[in-house]
């Protein structure tokens, strides 16, 4: 299933109407803890109004007589509910507001998607919560076979929950979230195989693992 904006849409977020009371908009934004919200003309999305703009140059709330006009709005791109989320993450991250508006092809408002909800969704997809551990392996920009690294990890009784990679100035980082009953053994074996572990989560039983490592080193020394 393609992950579209509609999958994360929120329809209960504050929304205001062009020509409405600026005092009401400012108070509702402040009460809800929202920095900005969409403004509509009928059902059509027009732009975003920011609480900071409504309170700009004031010592108190706007007066009851003041109306929400287009001059108070900021033009913010809307996304169609059916657009693919991952294809638009960069532009969403660059948005000034913590939410982006959704509108259909005719400009009718369909709700918002918040960066908070997107971050939670991404955290779930990479298994960032309990039950997973992080291991980052640094490899040369070329020549490293991802399939071989995955095979090596799985040979050490570990399951790969998710992975991704990115390029740095010195090489390539491959990020893994893994599940294993012996994370200490997995990391040490990967190092013994010659992989450069750039980062790994703390060992679940750090004190015990350190003692075990010293014991293994001692046994190895005695065998020699």
Image (cartoon, grey):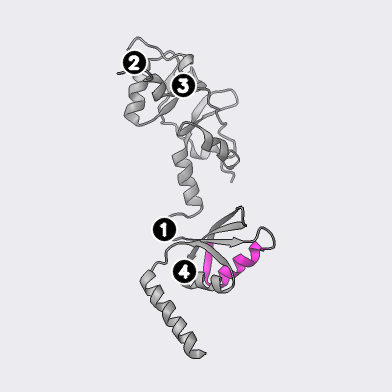
- Residues 131 and 133: in front is 133
What is the CA distance from the residue labelled 1 to the residue labelled 4?
A: 14 Å
What is the CA distance from the residue labelled 3 to the residue labelled 2?
A: 17 Å
Which comes sooner in the sequence, label 3 or label 2?
3
What is the CA distance from the residue labelled 2 to the residue labelled 4?
A: 58 Å
Which comes sooner in the sequence, label 4 or label 3?
3
Location of mark 1 (residue): 130
Q: Residues within 10 Å of mark 4 (few under 14, many from 20)?
A: many
Q: Quadrant of residue 30?
A: top left
Disc 1 versus disc 4: nearer the observer:
4
Which type of secondary structure does the marked residue at label 2 adopt?
Answer: loop
Q: Residue furthest left?
A: 60
Location of mark 3 (residue): 39
Tell me which residue sits at (38%, 69%) in the image. 206
Question: Does the magenta-highlighted stretch encompass residue 113?
Answer: no
Location of mark 2 (residue): 62
What is the CA distance from the residue labelled 4 to the residue labelled 3?
A: 51 Å
- Could you tell me residue 15's position as x and y percent? 42, 24
The reply to whether the C-beta atoms of the residues labelled 1 and 4 are less than 8 Å apart is no
Which type of secondary structure does the marked residue at label 4 adopt?
Answer: helix
Which comes sooner in the sequence, label 1 or label 2?
2
Q: Residue furthest top?
A: 65
Circle number at residue 183? 4
- Residues 116 and 83: in front is 116
Q: Residues within 10 Å of mark 3 (few under 14, many from 20)?
A: many
The reply to whether the C-beta atoms of the residues labelled 3 and 2 are less than 8 Å apart is no
């Amino acid at each position: 299933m393609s992950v579209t904006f509609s999958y994360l849409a929120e329809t209960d977020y504050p929304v205001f109407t062009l020509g409405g009371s600026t005092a009401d908009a400012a108070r509702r934004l402040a009460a809800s803890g929202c920095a900005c919200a969409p403004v509509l003309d009928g059902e059509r999305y027009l732009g975003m109004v920011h609480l900071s703009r409504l309170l700009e140059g004031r010592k108190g709330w706007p007066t009851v007589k003041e109306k929400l006009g287009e001059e108070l709005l900021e033009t913010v791109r809307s996304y169609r509910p059916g657009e693919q989320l991952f294809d638009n993450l960069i532009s969403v991250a660059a948005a000034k507001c913590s939410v982006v508006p959704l509108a259909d092809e005719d400009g009718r408002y369909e709700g918002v998607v918040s960066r908070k909800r997107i971050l939670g969704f991404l955290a779930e997809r990479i298994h960032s919560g309990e039950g997973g551990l992080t291991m980052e392996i640094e490899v040369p920009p070329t020549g490293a076979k991802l399939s071989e690294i995955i095979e090596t990890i799985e040979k050490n009784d570990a399951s790969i929950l998710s992975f991704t990679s990115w390029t740095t100035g010195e090489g390539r980082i491959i990020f893994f979230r893994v599940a294993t009953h012996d994370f200490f053994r997995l990391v040490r074996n990967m190092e013994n195989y010659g992989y450069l572990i750039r980062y790994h989560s703390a060992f679940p039983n750090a004190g015990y693992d350190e003692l075990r490592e010293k014991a293994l080193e001692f046994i190895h020394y005695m065998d020699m």
